[in-house]
Amino acid sequence: MSDSKEKYVPKIIKSVLKDVIAQKPLKKGIQQIRICNAWGETMGNHILSYTDEVRFSQNTLYVKLRSAPLKIELSYGLDTLVKRINDHLGGEFVQKITLV
C-alpha cells in the first residue's frame, strides 16, 4: 500500500523569505524602499526634518526639501552624497541625486 502523504522537507524561514524576496517585482520594490530610507539614515535627523519627500526612479534619487538654503548647501556636495548613500547600501544603486 502506497503512502499518499507527500513528504515535506523542512526549510529555515530565513531561506524561504530570501526566495520570496528574490522574486523580481518584490525585490525591486524592497530595493526602492531601502534606497529611499538610506537618505534619512545617512543624512541624519536634522536634514530629515527638512525633507518632505524622497523617491527613486531610473537610478536617480529625488529629494524634496522645504528649505532653500539647505538645498543650496547640499547641492555643492551631491557627488559626495551619492557616494555616501551607495556606501551605506553596499552597491552602486544611486547615480544621481536631484534636489527638488
Image (cartoon, rainbow, N blue to C red):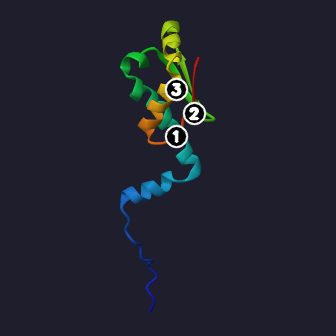
Q: Check contact, mark 1 vs mark 2: CB within 8 A.
A: yes
Question: Mark 1 highlights which residue?
Answer: 92
Vertical side of 2 occupied by 22: above or below: above
Q: Give the CA separation, mark 1 to mark 2.
A: 7 Å
Please, is residue 15 above or below residue 37 in the view? below
Q: Where is residue 92 in the image (x, y as percent from the top left)?
A: 52, 40
Q: Which of marks 3 and 1 is nearer the N terminus?
A: 3
Q: Earlier in the sequence, mark 2 or mark 3?
A: 3
Q: In which quarter of the image is residue 1?
A: bottom left
Residue 83 vs residue 36, the one in the foreground: 83
Q: In the rendering, at what x and y percent does residue 99 appear?
A: 56, 19
Q: Nearer the viewer, mark 3 or mark 1?
A: 3
Query: Which circle marks residue 95 in the picture?
Result: 2
The quadrant the C terminus occupies is: top right
Tell me if mark 3 has few (under 14), some (14-19) or many (20+) residues whose alpha carbon lies within 10 angstroms of its own. Answer: few
Task: Answer with left or right where residue 20 lies relative to residue 10.
Answer: right
Secondary structure beneath dot 1 equals loop
- Residue at 48%, 57% (x, y): give it: 19
In front: 9, or 63? 63
Residue bearing the label numbered 3: 79
Q: Which amino acid does label 1 sit on?
A: Glu
Question: Which kind of residue does numbered mark 3 sit on?
Answer: Asp
Viewed as shown, does residue 9 lie left or right of 71?
left
